[in-house]
Image (spheres, rainbow, N blue to C red):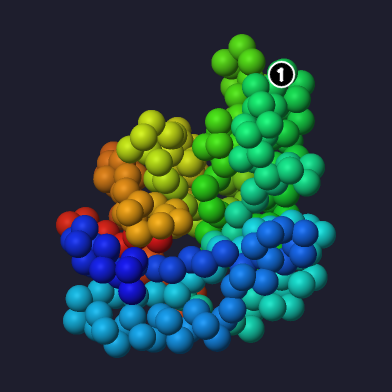
């Protein structure tokens, strides 16, 4: 209800709750998500805000090939509007922890290896056919992982193009993640990657502020909209796993 109140305050037309569903029992947040609790809370919000907000229910699932069997067994059973698939880890370590541990400035060889594995995992995620969109593509850069000399990973363009080519072939969209953009964080993916997706024929792009608190809801969406306007692509939203193109740029949905 607090998030919905914030959406109304910011003048948004709606929002999609993409709660995290985790399958790794070693994560501290494992078991937090309860589908029955989520559906009840969203039903209450829809009843209260029925004339003011278009409220949708989604999931963000961390893809890890070790848990693909469980993901395949559970996710298709859940009645949701939207499923976002994300890769958050490299060799068992969350990308955010590389920064916390001071390991985020890598050699050329280290960063090349990271993006090679990130690309392999993301392509495996696409091939499952489970996910509507790729969450915050190029999450390593979003989290501040860089080469020590400031140069891009040697295989960066090839990995991004390979991921996007497969996404287009499978009808999988990409999210422009605008979290902390107002504080100087980069878009994920950057505009150049969104342009490559468009050049390859991709037209399924959502906007997500990736809020973990009501105060962040909808932040930075204008930056994502600017990229899409320049490419002539309207953002999309999902209802019951079906695409809807959203052209009312005065009231974008927050994802």
Q: Residue at x 69, y 78 (%)?
A: 74
Q: To which residue does mark 1 refer?
A: 108
Q: Circle 1: is it few (<14), some (14-19), or many (20+) Cα within 10 Å?
A: some
Q: Which residue lies furthest to the top in this view?
A: 149
Measured from the top left, where is residue 144 in percent x and y? Answer: 55, 31
On the picture, is 241 further left or further right than 86?
A: left
Expressed as whole percent of the image width and height from the top left, the position of residue 132 reads 54, 64
Name the residue: 39% across, 75% down: 56
Q: In which quarter of the image is the C terminus?
A: bottom left
Which image quadrant is residue 129 in?
Answer: bottom right
Work out which quarter of the rendered image holds the N terminus and state it. Answer: bottom left
Q: In the figure, 61 relative to 110: above or below?
A: below
Residue 78: x and y in percent read: 59, 82
- The residue sitting at 36% across, 86% down in the picture is 44
Answer above or below: position of 240 versus 196.
Answer: below
Relative to residue 166, is residue 237 drawn left or right? left
Name which residue lies at 64% across and 62% down: 29
Q: Is residue 209 visible?
A: yes
Count the labels in the image: 1
When asked about the image quadrant of residue 230, the answer is: top left
Q: Can residue 127 be seen in this view?
A: no
| Rendered image quadrant of residue 220 | top left
Residue 85 lies, with reference to residue 187, above or below; the image says below
Location of residue 79 with respect to 58 vertically, above or below: below
């Amino acid at each position: 209800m607090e998030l919905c109140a914030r959406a109304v305050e910011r003048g948004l037309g709606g929002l999609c709750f993409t709660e995290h569903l985790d399958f790794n029992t070693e994560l501290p947040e494992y078991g937090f998500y309860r589908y029955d609790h989520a559906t009840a809370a969203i039903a209450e919000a829809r009843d209260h805000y029925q004339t003011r907000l278009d409220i949708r229910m989604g999931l963000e699932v961390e893809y890890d090939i070790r848990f693909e069997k469980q993901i395949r067994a559970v996710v298709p059973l859940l009645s949701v509007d939207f499923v976002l698939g994300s890769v958050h880890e490299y060799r068992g370590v969350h990308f955010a922890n590389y920064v916390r541990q001071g390991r985020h400035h890598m050699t050329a060889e280290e960063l090349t290896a990271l993006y090679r594995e990130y690309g392999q995992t993301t392509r495996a995620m696409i091939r499952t056919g489970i996910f509507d969109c790729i969450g915050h593509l190029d999450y390593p850069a979003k989290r501040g992982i860089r080469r020590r000399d400031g140069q891009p990973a040697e295989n960066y363009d090839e990995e991004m193009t390979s991921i996007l080519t497969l996404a287009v072939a499978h009808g999988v969209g990409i999210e422009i993640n605008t979290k902390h953009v107002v504080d100087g964080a980069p878009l994920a993916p950057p505009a150049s990657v969104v342009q490559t997706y468009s050049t390859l024929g991709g037209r399924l792009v959502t906007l997500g502020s990736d809020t973990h608190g009501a105060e962040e809801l909808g932040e930075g969406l204008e930056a994502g909209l600017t990229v899409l306007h320049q490419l002539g692509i309207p953002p999309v939203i999902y209802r019951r796993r079906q695409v809807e193109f959203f052209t009312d740029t005065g009231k974008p949905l927050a994802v």
